Image (tube, rainbow, N blue to C red):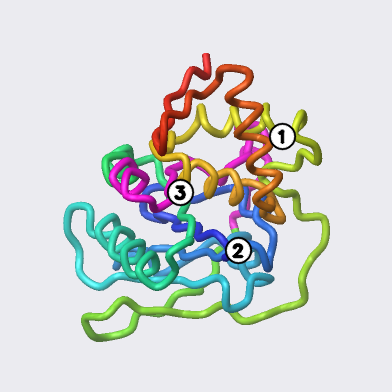
């Protein structure tokens, strides 16, 4: 099972709950506009434990939806390289939703969230910092500038996005996440999304148990490869 990707539209949203992601179990790509040459120190420090699994991608040139197009390009490139990859777009821009639906319809697990999954508004407000780090340097040329984060000692106490340990406990968390995200149209995409929501990712048996519970409680209806939702 590959580690899910989290693609952060940093022009649109500056996530306050990066500690919801656990080093070694997620890959993060932070997309920055051409004029974004500074990052908050708390963001840089939160990404450092991920080592090479965290990457800044600063685009060159400006224009409407420039960062969005770069995110779409990277999803296509990464999906071609890893058939079972799961993608999580972190952005408040609902313009991503048609792309998300298209990807799920074609068997690529993808969701969009306005914040890191599992983060509550109250928790987000408690994270603040006025310190600024000149963490991203522009590089010339037409290619996106890439800076791999240096590996530093991992900190402890990082909370997962979803943490239920039994099917009964996990199902309400899955329903909550489904209500917040674009719902996968295909069963295979739904299963991939459920796997990526738990840290560490669930095995196939655990995912199947959750899907069966959702069907039994009539929260979803499965017809062949298609899924319909009645989440309430």
Query: 39 or 103: nearer the eye?
Result: 103
Choose mark 2 or mark 3, whichever is in front: 2
Q: How many residues crowd mark 3 within 10 Å: few (<14), some (14–19), many (20+)?
A: many
Residue closest to the eye, 93 or 223: 223
Q: Is residue 155 magenta?
A: no
In this view, 96 is above or below 178: below
123 magenta-colored = yes
Query: Residue 100 falls in which quadrant of the image?
Result: top left
- Residue 57 lies, in percent from the top left, at 39, 71
- 55 shown above or below 76: below
Residue at x 64% of width, y 43% of height: 207
First in sequence, mark 2 or 3: give its number: 2
Distance in Å between CA atoms under marks 1 and 3: 23 Å
At x 80%, y 37%, the residue is 166
Of all residues, the one furthest to the left in this rendering is 63
Furthest residue in direction top, as rendered:
232
Magenta segment:
101-130
Residue lying farthest to the front in this orientation: 224
Q: Is residue 232 above or below residue 119?
A: above
What residue appears at the point 33 percent right and 69 percent down from the top-left corner?
A: 77
Q: Secondary structure at mark 3?
A: strand
Image point (61%, 49%), residue name: 195
Does residue 201 appear to the left or right of 133 in the view shown? right
Q: Secondary structure at mark 2?
A: loop
Between the C-alphas of marks 2 and 3, the distance is: 22 Å
Q: Which mark is residue 1?
A: 2
Q: Mark 2, residues whose alpha carbon is within 10 Å: few (<14), some, or many (≥20)?
A: few
Residues at marks 2 and 1, CA–CA distance in whole angstroms: 19 Å
State the residue position of label 1. 170
Q: Which mark is residue 90?
A: 3
């Amino acid at each position: 099972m590959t580690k899910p990707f989290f693609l952060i539209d940093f022009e649109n949203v500056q996530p306050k709950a990066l500690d919801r992601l656990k080093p070694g179990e997620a890959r993060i790509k932070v997309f920055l506009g051409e004029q974004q040459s500074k990052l908050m120190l708390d963001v840089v420090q939160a990404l450092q434990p991920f080592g090479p699994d965290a990457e800044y991608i600063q685009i060159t040139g400006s224009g409407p939806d420039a960062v969005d197009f770069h995110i779409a390009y990277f999803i296509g490139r990464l999906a071609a390289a890893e058939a079972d990859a799961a993608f999580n777009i972190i952005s408040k821009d609902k313009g991503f939703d048609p792309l998300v639906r298209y990807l799920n319809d074609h068997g690529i697990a993808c969701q969009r969230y306005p914040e890191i999954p599992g983060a509550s508004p109250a928790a987000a407000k408690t994270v603040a910092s006025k310190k600024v780090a000149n963490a991203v340097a522009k590089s010339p040329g037409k290619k996106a500038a890439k800076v791999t984060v240096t590996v530093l000692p991992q900190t402890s106490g990082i909370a997962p996005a979803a943490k239920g340990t039994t099917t009964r406990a996990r199902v309400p968390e899955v329903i909550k996440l489904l209500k917040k995200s674009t719902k996968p149209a295909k069963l295979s995409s739904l299963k991939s999304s459920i796997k990526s929501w738990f840290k560490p990712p669930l095995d196939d048996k655990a995912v199947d148990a959750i899907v069966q519970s959702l069907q039994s409680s009539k929260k979803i209806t499965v017809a062949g490869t298609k899924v319909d939702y009645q989440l309430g």
